[in-house]
Image (cartoon, rainbow, N blue to C red):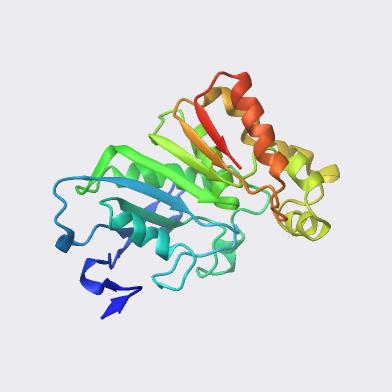
């Protein structure tokens, strides 16, 4: 059988994984290792990919959004880890609402504890773990790089992510402002929650290189969100590359 012209034997089947986060919450995930038929030897560098939403969900389905990227990477020798951090769908209402009024805090810890879990996997190079994601996953990438005193990730790729929840709320379309308010309330009443969840204040803590990608016609996350974070990184003298 072939998928997109690629023999099924060369595709990564993936395996279920789970770990315990900082507060005892169990986080489910999938770990994709390169197929043994590709002949790669030894521990693999890994891409830690966070879905968007935040109410998205990673599923072992080739039609799913990230699966082509997963297979693209595993065919080239990378391992890929896709966790469903708190706020994801499919694990009950309490889990889905576990990040209400808490963006950038508990969910960031879920990302960091996932990286710690990966250090127990014999097939993964612990010093070669990159974090990446788009939209809310981009936001998680920014948080994980700037709010991690252990610097668990070697680098990051933030695709159309936020770093300042206040300005992103102000600049996005009305329907998306309302969407954000479902989780965090209105900034006039919940400013402390918005500020607590804004990693732009922690740009000084970035120690690893980061690639920032943003489409200038993005109607969901305003391009100014990346511009603002890029300016913060430039001000702090950090290593980054910015592509639009």
Using residue 37 as the reference point, say whether residue 22 is left or right of it: right
> Residue 208 appears in which quarter of the rendering?
top left
Using residue 192 as the reference point, say whether residue 100 is left or right of it: left
Out of 176 and 226, give the one closest to the viewer: 226
Q: In this view of the protein, can residue 147 be seen by the observer? A: no
Q: Is residue 95 above or below residue 197?
A: below
Q: In this view of the protein, can residue 141 be seen by the observer? A: yes
Residue 219, horizontal then vertical, whole percent? 73, 55
Q: Is residue 105 above or below residue 181?
A: above
Q: Residue at x 71, y 36 (%)?
A: 195
Using residue 215 as the reference point, say whether residue 50 is left or right of it: left
Quadrant where the image shows the N terminus? bottom left
> Residue 194 appears in which quarter of the rendering?
top right
Residue 234, horizontal then vertical, whole percent? 60, 23
Quadrant where the image shows the C terminus? top right
Using residue 223 as the reference point, say whether residue 23 is left or right of it: left
């Amino acid at each position: 059988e072939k998928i997109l012209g690629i023999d099924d034997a060369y595709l990564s089947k993936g395996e279920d994984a789970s770990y315990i986060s900082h507060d005892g919450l169990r986080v489910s995930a999938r770990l994709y290792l390169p197929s043994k038929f590709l002949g790669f030897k030894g521990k693999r560098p890994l891409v830690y990919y966070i879905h968007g939403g935040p109410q998205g969900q990673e599923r072992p389905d080739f039609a799913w959004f990230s699966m082509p990227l997963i297979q693209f990477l595993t065919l080239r020798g990378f391992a890929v880890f896709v966790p469903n951090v708190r706020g994801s769908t499919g694990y009950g209402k309490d889990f889905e609402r576990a990040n209400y009024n808490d963006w950038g805090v508990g969910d960031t810890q879920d990302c960091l504890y996932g990286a710690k879990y990966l250090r127990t996997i014999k097939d993964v190079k612990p010093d070669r773990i990159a974090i990446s994601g788009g939209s809310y996953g981009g936001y998680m990438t920014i948080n994980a790089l700037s709010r991690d005193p252990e610097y668990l990730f070697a680098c990051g790729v933030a695709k159309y992510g936020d770093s300042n929840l206040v300005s992103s709320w102000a600049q996005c379309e009305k329907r998306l402002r309302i969407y954000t308010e479902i989780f965090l309330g209105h900034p006039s009443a919940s400013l402390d929650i918005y500020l607590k969840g804004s990693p732009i204040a922690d740009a000084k803590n970035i120690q690893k290189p980061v690639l920032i990608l943003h489409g200038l016609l993005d109607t969901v996350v305003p391009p100014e969100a990346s511009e603002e974070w890029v300016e913060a990184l430039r001000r702090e003298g950090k290593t980054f590359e910015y592509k639009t």
